[in-house]
Image (tube, rainbow, N blue to C red):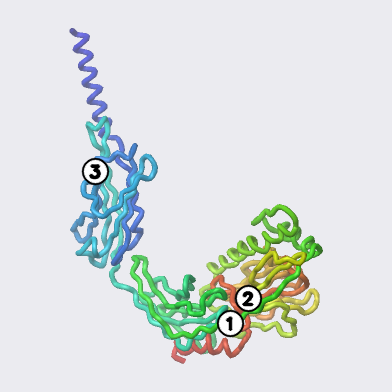
Amino acid sequence: MRFLLGLVVILVLAAGGAYLYAGKLPGPAIEIAKPTKYVGQTGTLEVSITAPAAKLSSFQIAFEQNGKQTPLVSLAQPGNAEIKMEGADRVRITRAIGRDAIPDLKTGPAKIVVTAERPVLFGLRKTQATASHDVTVRLEKPTIAVLSTKHYINLGGSEMVVYRATPADVESGVQVGDLTYPGYPASGAKVEGVNITSPAIKVAFIALRWDQDVNTPMYAYAKDEAGNAARAEFDHLSFPKPFKKSRIPLDDKFLDRVVPQILETTTDVNPQGSNLEKFLVLNGELRQKNAATIANYAKQSAPEILWGGAVFHPFTNTAVEAAFADQRTYVYDGKDVDRQTHLGFDLARVVNSPIVAANRGKVMHAGPLGIYGNCVILDHGMGVQSLYGHLSSIAVKVGDMVEKEQEMGKSGMTGLAGGDHLHFTMLVNGVMVNPVEWWDAHWIQDRIVRKLREASGS
């Protein structure tokens, strides 16, 4: 009897200890992924809850503002929320959030509050966890208005738009079809006769990419972190531009020279087979990867005009061997083997000619770059950049500030070059554009300087 009584006491104590221990087990892990910082007219709520086997007794998600809680979703009343399993232990809850979900939503501080319970000790107890996330409600849409006038853009060409966006901290720019061109503070427009101090006035250099439709829609936009957005149309005329077509003959002598040379300088591709097969990989896949590398430099562009509004050096006294957007067909042994678009000018003078900077800028790249061989890329600010390819030698380094017409190296035939020449192109936010416009003093004055002076009240 004593033994049985003792055993009962031990079992009771063990059960009590287990009960107490279970009550101290951690509750579900809660992660509030969205909204991150702001709530606007519309938005998305995204919460993840993790528990063993994703077993939850309950959860409630509420929006709290000015002492009032508005229920958004719960396990018992999911409403319009989407509840999905992510793995064995995780549940993700998403739903729309904004004025429709919270009728009393006001501009100002608020909080997302999540409470969740999971069963422990075979369901005899529950453990709870609570998490909250502070947000700011923004209900007012940004405003945007285009200030500049007379926008004319050629297919493959460039333009500039000046606009006012408020509040000054909203993301803004110009959308051209599926391409976005960011706006920069107009206070960075360091051009003679221009003095713009308002933080609301922005400048966006844009392009109509060579392969876009000539009637591609364009508009200025502004959007805040809460998802509120506004757009403004602007007057513009777009013009078609005929591009040349050419046939490029390939022979084994050329392939035997360029293919091994390029492969020694890149790990981006690893083609197999004959030199012709390798060339096709370099001319196609590597060309695309090089273009992506070049476009990435736009993210590092200075938020100011570094070149002062001066016309870009036109590289006179050179022979034009190929023009912008030349549609090339490559021919080997009498057969068409590839087609590519040549996005720049090939300019030849004499072997090892001095290559100078087209305008003042900062060196972003100075070294091998795939099909472009030894290459220099200059940043001129506000997304405008220039590229110099096929050099035999480079005399500048990354980070250098160079002045207009400062020598940066010598011409050559590195990369996919059939002979000694300079491959030159201009870029607008990573999009290669026709350099001819940037060599034209009248174009610079009318499309850029005039608009900046008008915006500054000159």
On screen, residue 210 above or below 278:
below
- Image coordinates of residue 351 in percent, x first then y, are 80, 75
3D distance between C-alphas at marks 1 and 2: 10 Å
The residue depicted at 75 percent of the width and 77 percent of the height is: 354
- Image coordinates of residue 30 in percent, x first then y, are 32, 47
Contact (CB < 8 A) between labels 1 and 2? yes
On screen, residue 16 above or below 102:
above
Pointer 1: what residue? 241
3D distance between C-alphas at marks 3 and 1: 64 Å
Pointer 3: what residue? 58
Q: Nearer the viewer, residue 291 or 380?
A: 291
Residue type, mark 1 in image? Lys
Instruction: Tell me which label, 3 or 1, sits earlier in the chain.
Output: 3
Instruction: Tell me which label, 1 or 2, sits earlier in the chain.
Output: 1
On screen, residue 86 above or below 198:
above
Classed neighbour count for the residue bearing mark 3: other residues with Cα under 10 Å, few (<14), some (14–19), many (≥20) = some
Instruction: Tell me which label, 3 or 2, sits earlier in the chain.
Output: 3
Q: Secondary structure at mark 1?
A: loop
Residue type, mark 2 in image? Ala
Please state which of the two labelled residues, at mark 3 or mark 1, is closer to the viewer: 1
Pointer 2: what residue? 325
Q: Secondary structure at mark 3?
A: strand
- Image coordinates of residue 389 in percent, x first then y, are 69, 70
